[in-house]
Amino acid sequence: MPMLAIVGIGLGVGIERLNSLETERLKDDLELLGRAIRMLVQEAILENDEEAVQRALDSVFDIGRVYGASVYDANGNRVAAAGIASRDLSRSRVAQEVVLTGEQQERTRQISGVEMYSQFLPLFDPLGQPNGFIQINRQASDFDASFARLTRVAWIIWAAMALLTLTVVIFGHYRGVGRHVNQLKQAMTRVEAGERDYRAATDGPGEVAQIAHGLNQMLDSIERKDEELELARQQEQELAEKLQHQEKMAAIGNVASGIAHELGAPLTVIDGRAQRLLRQEEDPDRQRQLIAIRGQVARLTRIVQQLLNYCRPAEEHVEEVADDAAIQLPQLLQDVLDNVRHELDDESLQLRLMLPETPLPIFYASASRLELALVNLVRNAAQVADQWVVVQVDFEPGPVSLHSRQQPELTIRVLDDGPGLTDSLTAQELKEPFVTTKGQGEGTGLGLAIVSNVAKEYRGQLNLENNPEGRGCIATLTLKLAT
């Protein structure tokens, strides 16, 4: 039986592989046909010669293996066609991809009620810009028809051989008692060797089958007990980890509550006095200074509130994270650098922002949570940097979905020229609350913990590593934000 199964699997894999190769060959044929007429079609379009375009399509359609060929402009409007072809592709996503990317595409789609495989090849104007595309169609069933008979014959032969083999085995050696006794002994030997999940076959004469059944029941009972013990151990470990995390969060909560209590009243007084002076002040320069004071007070108040939010259980952030707003990431990053720059004692320290050449899209996220994470990340780098801190941004668009926004992976790297990571603490330990490399009274050890927590809210992560090309550290924050 195992050998027959292996042969059957091998036969199926072989047939499937041949089918795949033939399918690729047929696809390549369509692509070659499209490339053969593309130059003719491009020249005919430039000369506005519709008859030449039609002749080129007819030349492809005359080949019996092609069911239709058509030419469309950049907007998906059909220019010419031969055979089965779509009338309008102006709303087709694949048509838009061909024009936007200038790369060929392929799809299986319904055309006039027939399942068709379509090859899309872009057309280019003299400047090399896509100005339309060619669609060549072939029935999807053609890809399978050439292998249908071969597959049927192969499986009939395999079934006949399997039936013959099983007949010989069943009415021969497998009918003997010695065979089943040997199987039972082999089962005991394998279990003794450590294969705890192996079970003895229960076929054969009644007495042997009863012994095998009893052995299997005993092994099942032992396995259930082992699983129960392992489950209890895992639950105990999870409870211990959860308790440890709750203790940490409770400690952070106490610190945050104390900060909020101690800073709340003074911040309110400062903001009120600044507001009163702003109403009385007529000098524009002083008005700007008072507005700046109120802005920093508001920022401190917001940071305290964000810190309190961090200390709440994760499920309490769901509403805030779900209520995302449109964010201009370059502006947010510039605001972060400006805020950190105001905190620095060393005015010579350079804070630089490096954006990708391609304009960044609008991201949807909680601006306050994202700002909190970025401020902590840049501030940590600035506190240890010697001369500069660089913030690099990169992103890769995610797959397009009709039901949701894209989920690109946004990558923000913060590089500095400081001493880098030490050997005394691992990168994972540095992301734990209250773990810091700063001296007594110079830091709380909450910065990277907050960044890591925000990253998890957006299905991302925070990685820390030394710069392999020189001094300093590279902090990489990856987030999956909707666009």
Image (cartoon, helix red, strand yellow):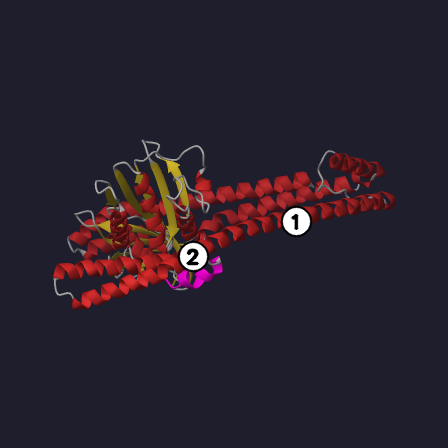
Whether residue 128 is situated above or below residue 84 in the rendered picture:
above
Determine whether, in the image, residue 236 is placed left or right of residue 386. Answer: right
Specify the label residue 231 is tagged with: 1
Q: Residue at (34%, 44%) from the top-left corner?
A: 380
- Mark 1 lies on a secondary structure that is helix
Q: Which residue corresponds to mark 2?
A: 258
- What type is the residue that disc 1 sits on? Leu
x%, y% of residue 300?
Answer: 32, 57
Please report the residue visible at 32 percent of the width from the left and 46 percent of the height from the top.
379
Q: Give the range drawn in magenta.
A: 314-325
Q: How crowded is mark 2: few (under 14 residues within 10 Å), some or many (20 or more)?
A: few
**Quarter containing the C terminus:** bottom left
| Residue 319, x across and y down, in percent | 43, 64
Judging from the image, what secondary structure is the residue with disc 2 in?
A: helix
Front residue of this view, candidates 117 and 367: 367
Left or right position of 135 against 6: left
Q: Is residue 191 left or right of residue 480?
A: right
| Mark toward the viewer: 2 or 1 | 2
Whether residue 417 is in magenta: the answer is: no
Spatial CA distance of label 2 from label 1 is: 40 Å
Q: Which residue is drawn at 50% across and 54% down?
A: 250
Q: In this view, does 215 lie above or below 78?
A: above
**Which residue is more in the foreground, 8 or 430?**
430
